[in-house]
Image (tube, rainbow, N blue to C red):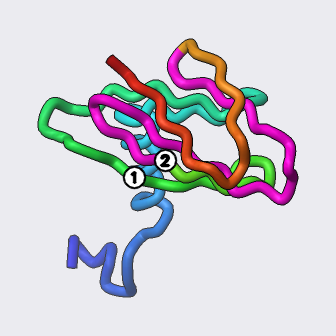
Amino acid sequence: IQGGTTKEGIHVGVMSGTVILALKAYAGLDVSGELVRIDPSLPADWRKVSFNIRFRGDRYYFVVTPEKVEVRVDSASEEPIDILVGDLSLTIDPREWTFIGLK
């Protein structure tokens, strides 16, 4: 117990804030615009980070390594999905993994 603050359980708000901070800082996740943007900058000792998010009704899956980003979008629509990886604008097919080299 941390001074009585967690006797009843975890503080989900703080934990989710920590996860969001890591995704923004290291995976470079930005969902503040019209498109999902990812611009990774993993710490030297990290080999991979995997996560998924829901954005505008679609589920995005990411696997980020120092060498590449893998992304898949599960969408109810058959239309291609636009995303940004760094400054690169990409159009990807839904429900298919797309691999983007970083170096």
| Whole-percent x, y for residue 85 in the image | 54, 24
Residue for point 33% across, 26% down: 41
- Where is residue 86 drawn, in percent x and y? 51, 19
Given residues 102 and 12, the one toward you in this image is 102
- Point out which mark residue 50 bears: 1
Q: Residue at x 22, y 72 (%)?
A: 3
Q: Tell whether 21 sits left or right of 42.
A: right
Please report whichever mark, 2 or 1, sits nearer to the chain's N-terminal start. Answer: 1
Residue 75 among those drawn in magenta? yes
Q: Is residue 49 left or right of residue 37?
A: left
- Rate crowding at label 2 as few (under 14), some (14 to 19) or many (20 or more) other CA atoms within 10 Å: some
Tell me the SS state at disc 2: strand
Q: Residue at x 43, y 42 (%)?
A: 23
Q: Residue at x 46, y 35 (%)?
A: 24
Which region is colored magenta? 62-86
- The residue indicated by pointer 2 is 62
> Type of residue at label 1?
Ser
Which residue of the protein is positioned furthest toward the bottom in this rendering? 8
